[in-house]
Image (cartoon, rainbow, N blue to C red):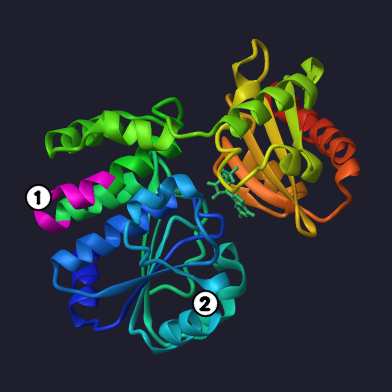
Amino acid sequence: MQIDRFSELILSANELVILSHTNPDGDAIGSVVAMKRFLTLQGKQSTIIIPNKHPEYLSFLDPDGEMLVYKENRKRAENIIRSCDLILALDFNQLSRIDELEPIVRESLSHKVLVDHHPSPEKGPFDLVFSETEISSNCELLYWLFNSYRNGEMPLEVAEPLYVGMMTDTNNFANSVLASTFKMASNLIEAGVDKERLQHLVFGGFNESRMRLMGHLLSEKMTILPEFEAGFIMLSKEDQERFSFSEGDSEGFVNIPLSIKGINISALFTESEGVVRVSLRSSNDFSVNKMARRFFNGGGHERASGGKLFIPFDQVADYFMESLNICIEEYRNEQI
Ligand code: 5GP
Ligand code: MN
């Protein structure tokens, strides 16, 4: 029934907008690009709008630079959202995840569909919600959705961005990989996806300064707290300037402390304009989603979450350790 409704909404729409979250990652960009290509095959024109620019390493998914970046073209993006008749929101569970676009989307009279894999999605603004949390990525959810819609036919131009989202959200098949994920990977490779090429484009194109930044952070800016089974990395403005940091260079850094024996919780703090960006990960049942919601103005998945802090960067480590102290105690009590 949901697929039928999805199909009806698409067929009856003339101006479609595809949206994803702020600081879009591989799953967000994979999702919007796959959706746009899927719609084109149905004879539907659409516009992708993202709140801010994606990291450079994902540019190959948008070779003609067709994505509209709200921060670079506010008026045009606003006008398109105001006049469209269908909004497809992908890979986010709360409209607050699109920042300044939130009120414009809320006020839009268009139909709205959400496809997402985060816990507790905001359902109110949407006519139709596809939500599944027991899945590797939003791209995997789209894969199964497109599969039901198209009876298994998966053109390569749709398969490729879906593969990228699944590969990046699982941290290259390390986390949140289920039997269905391998099934999807297998089917996409059969559909013609060149996995070595995508692997190289996503994980093999880093520049020298990014590698040196990683070395510097691991040597000088990573703190390990064995008593909390935790580790964290501080990425300051100063280090960003010293190593010519650009968006996407820190991709994967937050996972590194988890490969230390006995470490199950990890954090990366990135100093930014007026805000500290927070990334949290865990490799056991400790819920970083709970921690992000309670202490870091954010949320996400149980084992991968993020948020923001509005305190001076030099106070962040103490704040993290205090919040960790509280969360760990609660977690240990729950285990008894
Ligand atoms: P990352 O650490 O890769 O930036 O984000 C990890 C996860 O946390 C993502 O799945 C993302 O949806 C979620 N997340 C990141 N930043 C925020 C935020 O500011 N608010 C909320 N609610 N979730 C976030
Ligand atoms: Mn995702």
Instruction: Say if the magenta span includes residue 141.
Output: no
- Asked if 267 appears above or below 108 in the picture, the reply is above
Instruction: Give left or right: position of 259 versus 168.
Output: right
> Dot 2: within a 10 Å radius of its alpha carbon, few (fewer than 14), some, or many (20 or more) residues?
few
Between label 2 and label 1, give the one nearer the viewer. Answer: 2
Could you tell me which secondary element the residue under label 2 belongs to?
A: loop
Is the C-beta of the residue carrying label 2 under 8 Å from the nearest atom of ligand 1? no
| Quadrant in which the N terminus is drawn | bottom left
Question: Do we see residue 1 in this rendering?
Answer: no
| Quadrant in which the C terminus is drawn | top right
Q: Position of residue 259 (x, y in %)?
A: 59, 17
Camera-side residue of 113 and 209: 209
Amino acid found under the numbered disc labelled 2? Asn
- Residue for badge 1: 153
Could you tell me which secondary element the residue under label 1 belongs to?
A: loop
- Asked if 146 appears above or below 186 in the picture, the reply is below
At 10% from the left and 48% from the top, the residue drawn is: 152
The magenta stretch spans which residues?
149-160
Say which mark, if any, is on residue 193.
none
Instruction: Give left or right: position of 145 versus 91.
Output: left
Instruction: Say if the magenta span includes residue 154.
Output: yes
At 85% from the left and 45% from the top, the residue drawn is: 313
Mark-to-mark CA distance, 2 and 1: 36 Å
Amino acid found under the numbered disc labelled 1? Glu
- Residue for badge 2: 73
At 47% from the left and 75% from the top, the residue drawn is: 125
Q: Position of residue 158 (x, y in %)?
A: 22, 52
